[in-house]
Amino acid sequence: MRTLTRIGIALGIIVSSLAFAQQQDFSKVVISVHKISGNIYMLQGEGGNIGVSVGDDGIVIVDDQYAPLADKIRTALKGITDKPLRFVINTHHHFDHAGGNEMFSREATLIAHDNVRKRIASGGIGGNGGTVKFESAPGVPAALPVVTFDHSLTLHMNGEDIRALHFPSGHTDGDSVVFFTKSNVVHMGDDFVTYGFPFVDLLSGGSVKGMVAACESVVAQLPKDVKVIPGHGPVSTLDDVRRYIAMLKGTSAAVAKGIKAGKSLEQLKKDKVLEPWKQFNGAFITADAFIDTLYNEQTGKRPAALFKH
């Protein structure tokens, strides 16, 4: 998710991402550093989790949060190593993950899937086709990834292969999951989060079906003891991802059953069809907001992806 406050999302308010970043007070945000495995770290602050690889070749970070936090992020990195930042990989285009691009492009090369560059460049409307809707302004040239890829890209850095693999139509149409192959760590971006029901940006080519496919592929490919950095939340395990997949499949089936029975969107909400998954209900994406997502996806009330592969 890019820039909305939790209250704004719950109420379906349209918020400009640029205005949000300018108006929010980041002065009290603390960037915490968590060592994950070997030379891999995670930074947490305000926005998406940042994955960090450090070593003799320099620093690679995965995502960069908000522009006003750039100096705090730099300070946190200096507390880990005196090596320079060389690469930034964006997991997707949302402002809470790629908002620092313009600041970090001064010292590092920006890397992302082709669609991330296109969406940052164009700006536009995102959301779930219902209660969640937001607007972002076109990005400045310095915020655009200068190295893009279609399917996958590998950086040979710090003694391991750092592999970015594109999964289409999950959280957005530009998602990448980043594997630190030797360290046995994976950064999943917002295809996997721990805050509850996920935000799926249908208006940016995302889908719950694609999110399930991405998560299942990760579970199938990786060792059972891999450490998982979610887009938001604490470091997790593949068992956490499996529980997340079960929730996505179960909620999808519940809404599909209601649609087949001829129930309207309003009836599905009134019937509380997601009550069996109430532990995932949160202030960010409520059960009703997630019903919007599932209903709009399954009834075809969502636009086709703007950017093809």
Image (spheres, rainbow, N blue to C red):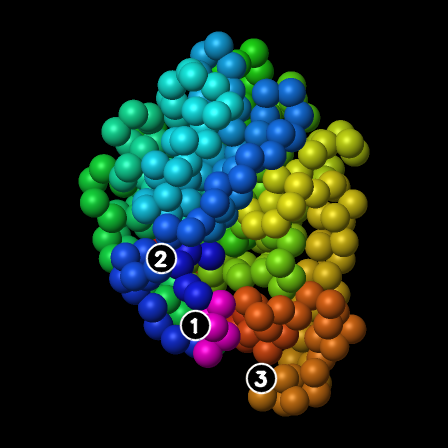
Identity of the residue drawn at 29% across and 32% down: 105
> Between 54 and 87, which is closer to the camera in this rendering?
54
Residue at numbered disc 3: 265
In the rendering, which numbered label is found on residue 8?
1
> Between 223 and 67, which is closer to the camera in this rendering?
67
**In the image, is residue 84 part of the stretch drawn in magenta?**
no
Helix, strand or loop for the magenta stretch, by majority: helix
**In the image, is residue 8 part of the stretch drawn in magenta?**
yes
Identity of the residue drawn at 58% across and 88% down: 266
Q: Where is residue 53 in the image (x, y as percent from the top left)?
A: 52, 24
Q: Position of residue 211 (x, y in %)?
A: 60, 53
What amino acid does circle 1 point to?
A: Gly
Residue numbers of the magenta segment: 6-11
263 above or below 229? below
Identity of the residue drawn at 48% across and 25% down: 79
Q: Look at the numbered disc 3 and give the secondary structure of its residue.
A: helix
Give whichever of discs 1 and 3 has the lower sequence position. Answer: 1
State which mark lies toward you, 2 or 3. Answer: 2
Q: Quadrant of the C terminus?
A: top left
Residue at numbered disc 2: 25
> Between 122 and 296, which is closer to the camera in this rendering?
122
Q: Quadrant of residue 38?
A: top right
